[in-house]
Image: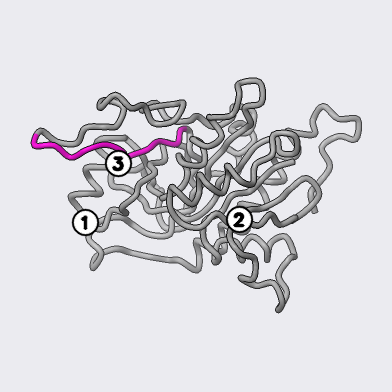
């Protein structure tokens, strides 16, 4: 079974709508850290926003005997210097999910937590790669693929946005992806699950008074892409079964 991990209620409602699960009684009703069935082979957990909530939710919700892996999906901010044509509403598949601001700010500049001698999770500065079989299926749904930077503080100034982009080479920033990956990476090797992160661009990073946003469009795409991606991953998971891949609707 695939577990979808989403941070915010608006993202969760967009996904519920696409899966036909929205009713007047359940819009925004599920608390964080509750597992919701969406379709055959697909469940969702709303983690809450930020690294600690995301990692805690996955540690609580993920069952290696039940779940084959996690797709973390939600909105994100476009960092400067991204690929041509990527803009508001674009779908970015994370080739790797990395921690962008774990460490210390020194007189000589930023020092990563890895350089300080405390590697970030099981993957360090290299980040967590997307599950290869999932990547192959999800590339057809995405507009581009590249590194996704997970931050504790969003880039609300041009200087910070440029620093994150220059230091990491990431296309998009968010507040959960690498934390979800970190929680999964601590599982025993034999049980290590699949992982993928997808971000839909909701805004341009940089000075807040100059940022461009299209949150309604991004949330709509979150729901659509979550359904398409879950369908694609479930097909991969079922590809060896006697019943064939089927459809999750």
Quadrant including the N terminus: top right
Residue situated in front as seen by the camera: 60 or 7: 60
Compared to 4, does 64 lie above or below?
A: above
Q: Say the numbered circle drawn on residue 33.
A: 2
Q: Which residue lies furthest to the right in this view?
A: 242
Disc nearest the viewer among 1 and 3: 3
Residue 192 lies in quadrant = top right
Secondary structure category for the residue under label 1: loop
Q: Main secondary structure of the magenta part?
A: strand
| Depth order, front residue of 69/158 | 69
Residue farthest to the left, as pictured: 107
Does residue 211 appear to the left or right of 186 in the view shown? left
Q: How far apart are marks 1 and 2 (CA)?
A: 32 Å
Residue 82 image offset from top left, x and y in percent: 34, 43
Q: In which quarter of the image is the C terminus?
A: bottom right
Q: Give the residue at mark 3.
A: 101
Q: Position of residue 142 (x, y in %)?
A: 54, 44
Residue pictured at 71% horizontal, 57% vertical? 36
Q: Is residue 116 left or right of residue 45?
A: left
- Secondary structure under tag 2 reads loop
**Circles 1 and 2 in contact, beta carbons < 8 Å:** no
- Labels 2 and 3: the sequence-earlier one: 2
Residue 124: x and y, percent? 39, 27
Q: Does the magenta stretch include residue 102?
A: yes
- Residue holding disc 1: 157
Instruction: Say whether disc 1 or disc 2 marks the residue closer to the N-terminus.
Output: 2
| Residue 145 percent across, percent down from the top left | 47, 37
Q: How would you rate the neighbour count of disc 2 (Cα within 10 Å): few for under 14, some for 14-19, many for 20 or more? A: some
**Magenta part of the protein: which range?**
96-107
Between the residue at mark 1 and the residue at mark 3, the CA separation in whole angstroms equals 15 Å
């Amino acid at each position: 079974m695939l577990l979808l991990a989403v941070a915010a209620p608006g993202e969760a409602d967009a996904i519920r709508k696409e899966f036909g699960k929205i009713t007047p009684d359940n819009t925004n009703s599920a608390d964080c850290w509750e597992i919701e069935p969406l379709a055959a082979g697909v469940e969702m957990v709303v983690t809450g926003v930020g690294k600690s909530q995301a990692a805690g939710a996955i540690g609580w919700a993920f069952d290696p005997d039940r779940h084959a892996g996690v797709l973390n999906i939600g909105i994100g901010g476009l960092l400067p210097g991204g690929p041509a044509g990527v803009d508001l509403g674009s779908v970015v598949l994370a080739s790797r999910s990395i921690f962008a601001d774990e460490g210390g700010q020194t007189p000589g500049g930023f020092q990563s937590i890895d350089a300080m001698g405390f590697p970030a999770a099981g993957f360090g500065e290299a980040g967590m790669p997307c599950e290869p079989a999932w990547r192959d299926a999800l590339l057809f749904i995405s507009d581009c693929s590249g590194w996704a930077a997970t931050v504790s503080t969003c880039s609300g100034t041009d200087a910070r946005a440029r620093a994150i982009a220059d230091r990491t080479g990431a296309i998009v920033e968010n507040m959960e992806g690498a934390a979800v990956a970190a929680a999964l990476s601590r599982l025993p090797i034999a049980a290590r699950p699949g992982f993928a992160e997808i971000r839909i661009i909701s805004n341009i990073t940089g000075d807040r008074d100059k940022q461009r946003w299209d949150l309604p469009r991004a949330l709509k795409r979150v729901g659509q892409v979550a359904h398409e991606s879950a369908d694609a991953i479930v097909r991969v998971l079922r590809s060896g079964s006697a019943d064939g891949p089927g459809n999750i609707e």
